[in-house]
């Protein structure tokens, strides 16, 4: 895209990274489904490998379709350079591999995406990396956990699935004072609702599987950084470890990004109404949604996020058994993990996404057995409301005699 510095977010979603194709003028970025690129001469090949010619060589090292996506997402985050990866976990493992090593320490939000925590505790621990998980919605916990060997502070905000919000600007100050980097998993907000660089983060990352792609048909990730040396370090690790994205997968995400703003707006509007409806229903114990004043970090959310998003967590009064009944009764809402797609999805973290954490760590992180995570999609509000209310009315009328444990689901 020609540089228009004043363009808005909706415009950038559609145009960033997408120039009409130079060969035939195709408006959609071509899919360069090629593993390798021909050189015109031996001298040109040598120049590409020595870096004096920045043309393409081999798709793991770089590809025009992937580059278009990297530019698009980096623009949406407000600048920097993007590195697209084969999955969100490939971007998180690349980040840890590039910034941590023997004897180093990371402080992380406790209710992070389950596999992020498992990766540190089960895999990186084998290479001498220490990790501490804290409730980062209270900055004092982050401060207390930082040690002389802390090299990375890792926030997920709002966190998964508790929707706890952590102060990015405050954590950036703490991390930088300790000589550590701050990384923020921005998956739940997408750059439409939160721009961590503006609050001092050094690294922003996404599971593009979620809002950026938005159609529940691709698994992909993205790292964005502003510092050139850090970019080179991350790219080196990504290329060596091989977690790179495929050009076709990149093209699908680029296509999804074009409607990001519209999707997020629609889902958020519906979420606000549904969160209020849910809060009034007698079958529900509590609702946690950043748009409700009852959210414990409501003011912080309003300050650092541009909107409350479309993820809602709630607890049913009758716990696990009522949760199971809800998931088996809804018809329009789909029982599936993942989030951020146009379809509304409902899931039970204790038995699904966060089962690997174990009951003790789940309890500490506030992931209760009856907690239901709801990712609101772009269907009509009335249809979603009717689907949920019918199921909740059945639950309210049902006599629950016992409650099995979470593993029973
Ligand atoms: C899904 C998710 C991930 C992992 O992404 P994949 O694309 O599934 O590898 C990481 N962080 C958050 C917050 C997620 O929701």
Image (cartoon, rainbow, N blue to C red):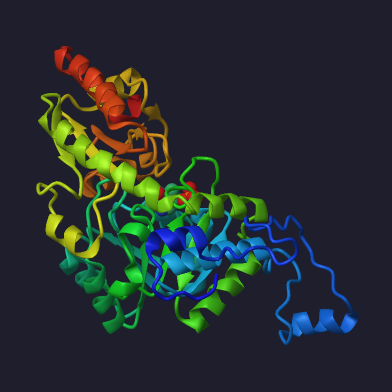
Q: Position of residue 21 (x, y in %)?
A: 68, 63
Please indicate, yes or no, whether residue 93 appears anywhere in the rendered image: no
Q: Which of 98 and 227 is in front in this view?
A: 227
Q: Where is residue 343 in the image (x, y as percent from the top left)?
A: 41, 35
The N terminus is located in which quarter? bottom right
Q: Nearer the viewer, residue 350 or 330?
A: 330
Q: In this view, does 30 lie to the left or right of 372?
A: right
Please indicate, yes or no, whether residue 64 appears anywhere in the rendered image: yes
- The residue depicted at 21 percent of the width and 46 percent of the height is 366
Examine the image and state in which quarter residue 173 appears. Answer: bottom left
- The residue depicted at 71 percent of the width and 63 percent of the height is 59
Q: Where is residue 333 in the image (x, y as percent from the top left)?
A: 36, 27
Q: Nearer the viewer, residue 140 or 4?
A: 4
- The residue depicted at 33 percent of the width and 43 percent of the height is 266
Q: Where is residue 403 in the image (x, y as percent from the top left)?
A: 21, 22
**Extreme residue toward the bottom, this view:** 52
- The residue depicted at 73 percent of the width and 87 percent of the height is 52
Examine the image and state in which quarter residue 342 appears. Answer: top left
The C terminus is located in which quarter? top left
């Amino acid at each position: 895209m020609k540089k228009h510095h004043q363009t808005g977010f909706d415009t950038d979603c559609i145009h960033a990274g997408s120039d009409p194709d130079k060969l035939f003028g195709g408006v959609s970025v071509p899919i360069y489904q090629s593993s390798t690129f021909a050189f015109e001469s031996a001298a040109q090949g040598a120049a590409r490998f020595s870096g004096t010619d920045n043309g393409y060589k081999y798709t793991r090292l770089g590809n025009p379709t992937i580059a278009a996506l990297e530019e698009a997402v980096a623009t949406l985050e407000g600048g920097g350079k993007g590195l697209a990866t084969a999955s969100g976990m490939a971007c998180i493992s690349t980040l840890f591999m590039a910034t941590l090593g023997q004897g180093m320490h990371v402080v992380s939000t406790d209710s992070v995406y389950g596999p992020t925590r498992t990766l540190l505790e089960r895999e990186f621990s084998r290479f001498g990396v220490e990790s501490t998980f804290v409730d980062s919605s209270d900055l004092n916990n982050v401060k207390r956990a930082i040690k002389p060997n802390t090299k990375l502070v890792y926030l997920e905000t709002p966190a998964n699935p508790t929707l706890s919000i952590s102060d990015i600007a405050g954590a950036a100050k703490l991390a930088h004072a300790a000589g550590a980097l701050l990384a923020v998993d921005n998956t739940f907000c997408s750059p439409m609702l939160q721009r961590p660089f503006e609050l001092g983060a050094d690294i922003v990352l996404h599971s593009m599987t979620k809002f950026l792609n938005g159609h529940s048909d691709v698994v992909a990730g993205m790292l964005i950084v502003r510092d050139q040396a850090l970019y080179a370090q991350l790219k080196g690790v990504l290329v060596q470890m091989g977690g790179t994205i495929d050009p076709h997968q990149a093209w699908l995400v680029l296509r999804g990004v074009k409607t990001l703003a519209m999707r997020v707006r629609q889902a958020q509007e519906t979420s606000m109404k549904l969160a209020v409806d849910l809060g009034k229903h007698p079958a529900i114990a509590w609702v946690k949604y950043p748009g409700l004043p009852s959210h414990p970090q409501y003011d912080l959310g309003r300050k650092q996020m541009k909107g409350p998003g479309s993820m809602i967590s709630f607890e049913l009064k009758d716990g696990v058994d009522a949760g199971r009944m809800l998931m088996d009764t809804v018809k329009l809402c789909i029982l599936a993990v993942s989030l951020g797609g146009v379809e509304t999805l409902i899931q039970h973290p204790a038995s699904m996404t966060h089962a690997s954490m174990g009951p003790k760590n789940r309890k500490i992180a506030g992931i209760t057995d009856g907690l239901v995570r709801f990712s609101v999609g772009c269907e009509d509000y009335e249809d979603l409301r009717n689907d949920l209310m019918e199921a909740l009315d059945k639950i309210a009328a049902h006599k629950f005699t016992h409650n099995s444990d979470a593993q029973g689901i």
